[in-house]
């Protein structure tokens, strides 16, 4: 079992995926730079959680 993502992380990630979904890849480090560029996120911890969820969603989308 994994950790449960908060509503803030999920909502922010889905908004980013809707507007910039084609820019993200399976690479966490690359996604981290893109998330920092397109979104104004106050803390590094929150940015990394959102980036991890983006990476997971992209990997799942490419798997299908």
Image: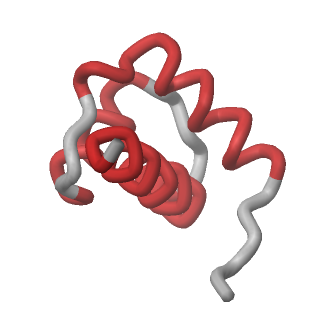
How many circles with numbers are drawn on the protein? Answer: 0
User: Quarter of the image holding residue 61?
Assistant: top left
Q: Position of residue 28 (x, y in %)?
A: 25, 58
In the image, 35 versus 21, the foreground residue is 21
In the image, 51 versus 47, the foreground residue is 51
Q: Position of residue 59 (x, y in %)?
A: 32, 51
What residue is rendered at 50% in x and 54% in y?
53
What residue is rendered at 65% in x and 34% in y?
12
What residue is rendered at 30% in x and 49% in y?
63
Q: Position of residue 25 (x, y in %)?
A: 20, 41
Q: Is residue 8 left or right of residue 27?
A: right
Residue found at the very far front of the displayed protein: 64
Q: Is residue 18 left or right of residue 34?
A: right
What residue is rendered at 72% in x and 35% in y?
11
Q: Is residue 31 left or right of residue 45?
A: left
Residue found at the very far bottom of the displayed protein: 1
Q: In this picture, is 48 found above or below 55? A: below
Q: In this picture, is 37 found above or below 4? A: above
In the image, 57 versus 52, the foreground residue is 57
Q: Position of residue 45 (x, y in %)?
A: 54, 65
Residue found at the very far right of the displayed protein: 7
Q: Quadrant of the C terminus?
A: top left
Q: Is residue 10 left or right of residue 33?
A: right
């Amino acid at each position: 079992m994994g950790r449960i993502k908060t509503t803030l992380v999920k909502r922010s990630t889905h908004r980013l995926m809707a507007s910039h979904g084609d820019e993200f890849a399976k690479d966490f480090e690359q996604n981290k730079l893109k998330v920092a560029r397109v979104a104004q996120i106050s803390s590094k911890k929150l940015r990394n959680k959102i980036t991890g969820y983006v990476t997971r969603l992209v990997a799942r989308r490419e798997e299908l």
